[in-house]
Amino acid sequence: MSAPFAIQLDEVSLARDGRTILDRLSVGIPARGVTALIGPNGAGKSVTLRIIDGLLRPDSGSVRLAPGRRAFVFQRPALVRASAAANLALGLAALTLSRRERAERVAAALERVGLSDRANDAATRFSGGEQQRLVLARAWAMQPDLLLLDEPTASLDPAATETIESLIAEMARAGTTVLLVSHNLGQVARLAEEVVVLSAGRAAERGPTRSVLFSPRTAEARAYLTGELPWTSFAAAS
């Protein structure tokens, strides 16, 4: 793998039920900051994350990852029927930590997302925004080298979204490579240094965020961005 890349996908293809989902996708993800995967529904964004994480096996092609820990935050929080603190501790189980170190990380993570007073509450009874803060806190406590995010603020209110975006930015500044799938192009503009536009399972365009969002070069990227009417209005006013 080339030194600048944390992830390298080469000619990755995947088909299901006769439909091509990824079509010889080749793209490198820098080993720094936040890279966003954007594109229309069905472009293959979430599938790409799952292939990177090893949850799906491609039909062909190769996926190479830089060594290190990774964490995956799904659009719908994955939590067990236990307390908030227990859910965070479970995420740390694979790490070689003393009981004291584990407890300190759990406490710090809950404090970071404003849930210290809910440590002993059942996580499955939290609101949607609180659950997403909790799973991101779990990822933060793991101190991953690579963080995969699939629409982490979908359907959340602005306050919860702001908290989660702040934590994502903090993790990136601390050295975590972040790969973010989001339809919220304002969020992409706030967080990402680079953008990859997927279309029909291929990388239609990639480059610095502002260049891609405001001056897309390809017809596929222009069609997607033009179709996002709220974003179009925001871009015109900027």
Image (spheres, grey):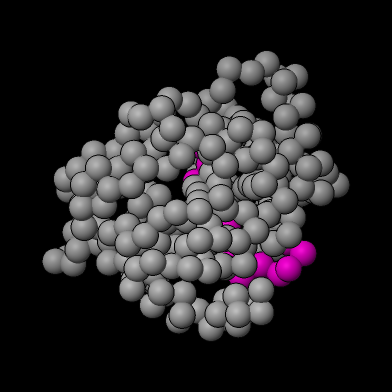
Instruction: Tell me which residue sits at (50%, 53%) in the image.
Output: 208
Q: In the figure, residue 108 lies in which quadrant? A: top right
Q: Which quadrant of the rendered structure holds the N terminus?
A: top left
Instruction: Tell me which residue sits at (23%, 48%) in the image.
Output: 12
Residue sitting nearer the eye, 186 or 55: 186
Instruction: Tell me which residue sits at (71%, 69%) in the image.
Output: 157
Residue sitting nearer the eye, 39 or 238: 238
Q: Is residue 154 left or right of residue 30?
A: right
Q: In the figure, residue 216 lies in which quadrant? A: bottom left
* Whole-percent x, y for residue 158 in the image: 73, 68
* Whole-percent x, y for residue 70 in the image: 49, 35
| Residue 44 seen in the figure | no
Instruction: Tell me which residue sits at (33%, 47%) in the image.
Output: 27
Give the farthest residue toward the right. 117
Residue sitting nearer the eye, 233 or 99: 233
Using the image, determine if residue 69 lies above or below residue 40. above
Range shown magenta: 146-160
**Magenta stretch contains residue 167:** no
Q: In the figure, residue 138 lies in which quadrant? A: top right
* Whole-percent x, y for residue 22 in the image: 25, 57
Q: Is residue 165 left or right of residue 37?
A: right
